[in-house]
Structure formats: C-alpha cells, structure tokens
Image (cartoon, helix red, strand yellow):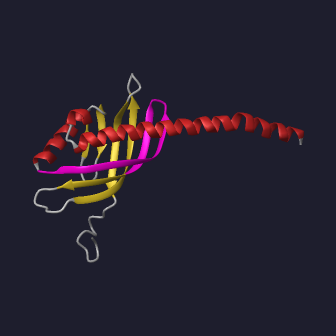
C-alpha cells in the first residue's frame, strides 16, 4: 500500500505539472496558428498576394478542392492569377483552428473555414463552409511557413440544384 501511495504521489508531483505545461504550450500554439491565419486571411481578401505568398514554403504542396495538385509557390501564383483573370473574387474568408500540435520543426493544424466569393455571371455571392489540414515547417527564425495544405468543402456538388437544397 505504501508503494502505491508513492507511485500516486510521484504521478501527482511530476505528472500534473507536465500536463499543465503541455496544455499551456498547446494554448500558445493555437494562438500562434490563429494569428498566422488571421493575417493570411486578410491578405487573401485584400488580394495582397505578396504578403500571402510570403507565408508559403517555396516547395509548398497544395492539394486543393476540385482541382489538381499544385507544387511550389510559382504554381500557386499561376493558379491565383488564372482565377483572378476569370473574375473570381473572395469577399470574405475565416478559418477556425480546432486542433494543432507540434512535431519537431513541423506544426499540424486542423480546422474549419467559411468563405464567400463572387463569380462572374452570378448575381449572388457563393457562401460555403469546409475543413482543412495545414502542415507548417518552421524556418531558421522559428516562423511558420506552409509546407502542405489541403481543404475541402462541406457542400456536395451532387446535391446542388436538387429539390429542397438551398
């Protein structure tokens, strides 16, 4: 019984502070990815592509929804330019990180997003929600850079236009 009390006391003495420290570090990490996302979102809506693309690693991999894989910042820029030339304009975008954890010099973030965009030939703004995963790497200064991103919509295109779908 005495040995059991010793184990419990050790767990309380060493385990609780470690758990509290881990929780505190996770709160800081969530704040970091949220602040990162806030700046990136503002740049996207303001069409400030120099700021936006500055957040990406040069060799980024983008696994976009309903489109081909894009490799590298140059491919992202080309895709953006094509979408802009076609008349697409994002009027609002917000992300909400729900989970984040650090693995060495990488950070993995999972979250949800809300987007509103205007398309040529459409009178109403398209509004959508979805989910995403972003993998960051830390550069030499410790700043986050997007290494891999993927997202997908909650909207099922097979249901769009179906009776009862709004």
Is residue 88 shown above or below 157? above
Res. 1 visible in picture: yes
14 within the magenta span:
no
Q: Main secondary structure of the magenta part?
A: strand
Residue segment shown in magenta: 87-112
Total marks placed: 0
Image quarter hosting the C terminus: bottom left
- Horizontal side, residue 20 vs residue 3: left or right: left
Q: Quadrant of residue 165?
A: bottom left
Is residue 67 shown above or below 9? below
- Horizontal side, residue 124 vs residue 62: left or right: left
Q: Residue furthest top?
A: 140
> What residue is at 25 percent from the left and 68 percent from the top?
160
Q: Position of residue 16 (x, y in %)?
A: 68, 38
> What residue is at 27 percent from the left and 68 percent from the top?
158
Q: Residue furthest right?
A: 1
99 within the magenta span:
yes
Q: Position of residue 118 (x, y in %)?
A: 17, 55
Image quarter hosting the N terminus: top right
> What residue is at 31 percent from the left and 62 percent from the top?
155
Is residue 90 shown above or below 73? below
Q: Nearer the viewer, residue 80 or 97?
A: 97
């Amino acid at each position: 019984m005495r040995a059991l009390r010793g184990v419990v006391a050790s767990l309380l003495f060493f385990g609780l502070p470690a758990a509290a420290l881990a929780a505190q570090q996770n709160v800081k990490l969530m704040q970091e990815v949220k602040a990162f996302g806030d700046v990136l979102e503002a740049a996207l809506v303001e069409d400030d592509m120099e700021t936006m693309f500055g957040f990406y690693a040069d060799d980024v991999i983008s696994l976009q929804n309903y489109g081909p894989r894009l490799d590298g910042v140059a491919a992202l820029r080309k895709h953006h330019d094509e979408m802009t030339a076609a008349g697409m304009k994002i009027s609002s975008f917000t992300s909400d990180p729900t989970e984040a954890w650090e693995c060495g010099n990488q950070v993995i973030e999972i979250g949800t997003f809300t987007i509103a965009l205007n398309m040529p030939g459409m009178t109403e703004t398209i509004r959508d929600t979805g989910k995403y995963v972003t993998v960051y790497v830390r550069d030499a200064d410790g700043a986050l850079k997007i290494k891999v991103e993927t997202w997908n919509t909650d909207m099922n295109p097979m249901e769009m236009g179906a009776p009862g779908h709004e």
